[in-house]
């Protein structure tokens, strides 16, 4: 296996709750109140729609707000990875990835493993440059049992909800996440920081029409059928874990341009923080209003348009 290159689940397309529009000569993300499923092909007007996008809209009043899915792995952290990520605004390359305790960072002296104080306590994260960043891989349909669609988000509500749900479903199913019939569901909420404007985030639940008990029974039966056919779920999870650990950073250079366009459009003209890490400026003590504004910016969900 190649060293230094993360081997990630095969991707057939992307799931988003927004899109990129052109405004005043700039390409900016625009929020939406529904899912969009795109292919991996990009045209002059953006990502081309995947055939599943129209197929799943049937019966949903032309608003795609739920998607039936299965997960590829039993381990929650393999299906959904979330970390603090600092991207270079020009190249789109990840510069630092951490979990709040340790991080892997590209410095002037090369790649290093360092303590991670989280964005609130990191001098490199000024200007909302470092964000929680999650990637969820799901299987849609039966055409390709190992092909996935990826949902990317920096939204605090989506990250927290998805992480909690996967941990809970893993626990109550006896570690049968990959066999559960699940559904991605779009939810909305209003907060003080959003000034009454709805914020949309992604949840994952038992598939519509099934009770929790029915879903657990179906998962148990599917697991038995897979074992009888020779399907080795433990080996698949182990192979995925080895693939993720092969590289320091998960996202490839092909993906980083779209990531910066989506999540860092407002600060893309600023210099990279790595360029100034040798002589960091002493930040002024922020006011209470500034702290609240910064917290609101971090916690408001932004759409994923990958």
Image (spheres, rainbow, N blue to C red):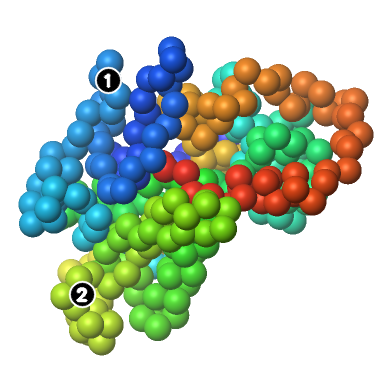
Instruction: Determine whether the residue tagged by mark 1 lies in a helix, strand or loop.
Output: loop
Which quarter of the figure is the C terminus placed in?
A: top left
Q: Residue at x 13, y 56 (%)?
A: 60
Q: Is residue 255 above or below residue 58?
A: above
Q: Earlier in the sequence, mark 1 or mark 2?
A: 1
Up-down: is 212 above or below 190?
Answer: below
Disc on res. 45: 1
Q: Which corner quadrant of the image does residue 224 belong to? A: bottom left
- Structural crowding at the residue carrying mark 2, measured as other residues with C-alpha within 10 Å and reported as few (<14), some (14–19) or many (≥20): some
Residue bearing the label numbered 2: 222
Q: Residue at x 25, y 87 (%)?
A: 213
Q: Position of residue 236 (x, y in %)?
A: 37, 59
| Residue in the image at 12% along x and 53% along y | 61
Can residue 161 be seen from the camera position used here? yes
Q: Nearer the viewer, residue 3 or 205?
A: 205
Label 1, label 2: how far apart the Cα atoms are: 41 Å
């Amino acid at each position: 296996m190649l060293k230094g290159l993360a081997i990630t689940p095969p991707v057939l397309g992307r799931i988003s709750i927004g899109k990129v529009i052109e405004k005043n000569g700039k390409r900016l993300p625009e929020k939406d109140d529904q899912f969009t499923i795109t292919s991996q092909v990009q045209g002059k007007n953006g990502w081309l729609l995947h055939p599943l996008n129209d197929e799943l809209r049937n019966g949903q009043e032309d608003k795609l707000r739920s998607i039936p899915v299965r997960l590829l792995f039993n381990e929650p952290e393999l299906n959904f990875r979330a970390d603090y990520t600092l991207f270079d605004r020009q190249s789109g390359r990840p510069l630092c990835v951490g979990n709040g305790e340790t991080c892997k960072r590209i410095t002037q002296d090369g790649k290093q493993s360092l303590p991670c104080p989280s964005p609130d306590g990191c001098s490199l994260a000024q200007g909302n440059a470092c964000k929680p960043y999650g990637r969820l891989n799901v299987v849609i349909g039966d055409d390709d049992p190992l092909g996935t669609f990826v949902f990317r988000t920096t939204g605090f509500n989506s990250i927290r909800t998805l992480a909690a749900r996967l941990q809970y479903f893993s626990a109550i199913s006896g570690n049968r996440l990959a066999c559960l019939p699940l559904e991605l569901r779009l939810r909305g909420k209003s907060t003080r920081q959003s000034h009454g404007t709805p914020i949309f985030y992604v949840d994952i639940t038992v598939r519509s029409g099934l009770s929790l008990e029915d879903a657990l029974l179906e998962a148990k039966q599917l697991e038995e059928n897979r074992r009888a056919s020779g399907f080795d779920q433990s080996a698949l999870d182990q192979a995925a874990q080895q693939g993720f650990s092969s590289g320091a950073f998960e996202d490839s250079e092909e993906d980083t341009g779209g990531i910066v366009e989506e999540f860092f459009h407002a600060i893309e003209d600023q210099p990279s923080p790595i360029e100034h890490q040798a002589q960091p400026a002493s930040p002024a003590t922020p006011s209470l209003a500034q702290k609240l504004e910064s917290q609101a910016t971090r916690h408001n969900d932004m759409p994923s348009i990958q």
